[in-house]
Amino acid sequence: MTAPLSRADRATTVLSRHVAALHTALLRRTGGRLGNRFRGGDVVLVTCRGRMSGQPRTTPLLHVRDGADVVVAASNGGIDAEPQWWRNLRADPRGEVEVRGRRWAVTASEVDDADRPRLWAALSARFDGYDGYQARVSRRIAVVRLSPAD
């Protein structure tokens, strides 16, 4: 069971949801021409089904590419709780990504221990906040590979 969120983490979560909704709308409205970079990193829209609602949920995330795969960190903005999008993808790994207006189906998996250091370093090179997030949370932040679906 997940520990209750602090008041600050709850406020951050609410604010993040609103910012994510605005960011998603901007990306979609402009076909990815505006909002495709954030804090020095490239943005991907990740869509998955809510594990309880079954409704599509879209989240903008910073990413790096690893061949044909998109790689993201389940950092949740440094909150000590896994992000809902990652919990949803663990329940059903099928999803969709959108980069600069181009969409394709993906299958999600957590990066294995052999690839994690290399991909964590690549993500941290794009956004230096990830190392600080990892230092302040008790969980190991998952590095997630989104591979093109067969």
Image (tube, rainbow, N blue to C red):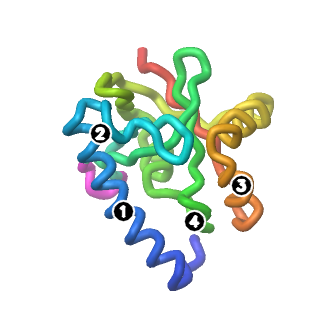
Q: Is label 1 in a helix, a strand or a loop?
A: helix
Disc 3 is placed on an element classified as loop
Q: Earlier in the sequence, mark 4 or mark 2?
A: 2
Query: Residue under circle 2?
Result: 27
Rounded to the nearest whole Å, what is the CA distance between mark 1 and mark 3?
22 Å
Magenta segment main secondary structure: loop
Q: Amino acid at mark 4?
A: Ala
Quote the CA–CA distance across marks 4 and 1.
Answer: 15 Å
User: How far apart, in angstroms, are the residues tagged by discs 4 and 2?
Assistant: 26 Å
Question: Considering only order in the chain, which callout, 2 or 3, is on the residue closer to the N terminus?
Answer: 2
Q: Quadrant of the N terminus?
A: bottom right
Q: Amino acid at mark 3?
A: Arg
Q: Position of residue 40 (x, y in %)?
A: 56, 41
Q: CA distance from mark 3 to mark 2?
A: 30 Å
Residue identified by numbered label 4: 81
The residue type indicated by label 2 comes to Leu
Which portion, as a residue range, is magenta? Answer: 51-55
Q: Is residue 97 above or below residue 74?
A: above
Say whether residue 91 is left or right of residue 6. left
The residue at which mark 1 appears reads as 17
Which of label 3 and label 2 is nearer to you?
2
Give the x, y percent position of residue 142: 64, 47
Of the two numbered discs 1 and 3 on the same chain, state the one appearing first in sequence: 1
x 33%, y 49%: residue: 23
Image quarter of the C terminus: top left
Local packing at callout 3 (Cα closer than 10 Å; few below 14, some 14-19, many 20+) is: few
- The mark found on residue 148 in the picture is none
* Numbered disc in front, either 1 or 3: 1
